[in-house]
Image (tube, rainbow, N blue to C red):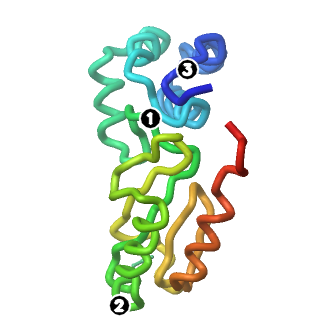
Amino acid sequence: MKATEIDWDRFAEIIEKHAQKKWGLIPLLQEVQERFGYIPPETIGAVAEALDLYPSHVQGVITFYAGFSTEPRGKCVLKVCRGTACHVKGGKSILRVIKRDLDLEEGETSPDYQFTLETAACLGACFLAPAMMVDREYYGKLNPTKVTSVIGEYRKPEGDE
Ligand code: FES
């Protein structure tokens, strides 16, 4: 399935699970994002209706939380730390290697929707500097060789569509 196709049946299941729950908005949005890799803008109206909210309220929450995105993102989201502890331990060259290996700039997603590259002010793991995350997994004490091998683990096998 392409990242831009919406499985509306699956979406309806998520809505049904969270509808009418007073504090359901964040868990609902998290589940939509986990399932689709992003929050398709065309689902915002239905989310608002299910929880009896204004679409502008839903949009506001999506904008407020950095973890939510209305743009299709890659299957693997790389977050590279730009914080001071990582910077002094060579974080800049780690970011350079990742950009080169993935042929992506910050904020970009690969055309096959396999990778999205992001940076963060601090990943809260300074003792691992220089550090990055792939989805929820931490990788620390990185060097160019290690980072290339981590990226290799997340590449799609040849011929896998
Ligand atoms: S500065 Fe990089 S994890 Fe804190």
Q: Residue at x 42, y 67 (%)?
A: 100
**Pointer 3: what residue?**
21
Front-most of 156 and 73? 156
**Pointer 1: what residue?**
72
**CA separation, marks 1 and 3?**
27 Å
Q: Is mark 2 within 8 Å of ligand 1?
A: no
Mark 1, residues whose alpha carbon is within 10 Å: few (<14), some, or many (≥20)?
A: some
Task: Give whichever of discs 2 and 1 has the lower sequence position.
Answer: 1
Mark 2, residues whose alpha carbon is within 10 Å: few (<14), some, or many (≥20)?
A: few
Q: Nearer the viewer, mark 1 or mark 3?
A: 1
**Pointer 2: what residue?**
88
Q: Are marks 1 and 3 in contact (CB under 8 Å)?
A: no
Task: Give whichever of discs 1 and 3 has the lower sequence position.
Answer: 3
**CA separation, marks 2 and 3?**
46 Å
Q: What's under tag 2, amino acid-wise?
A: Val
Q: Are marks 2 and 1 in contact (CB under 8 Å)?
A: no
Quarter of the rendering occupied by the N terminus: top right
Task: Give whichever of discs 2 and 3 has the lower sequence position.
Answer: 3
Q: Is residue 61 above or below residue 157?
A: above
Q: Is residue 11 left or right of residue 65?
A: right
Quarter of the rendering occupied by the C terminus: top right
Answer with the quadrant where ligand 1 appears in the image: bottom left
Front-most of 95 and 65? 95
Q: What's under tag 1, amino acid-wise?
A: Pro
Front-most of 66 and 25? 66
Q: Position of residue 106 (x, y in %)?
A: 33, 58
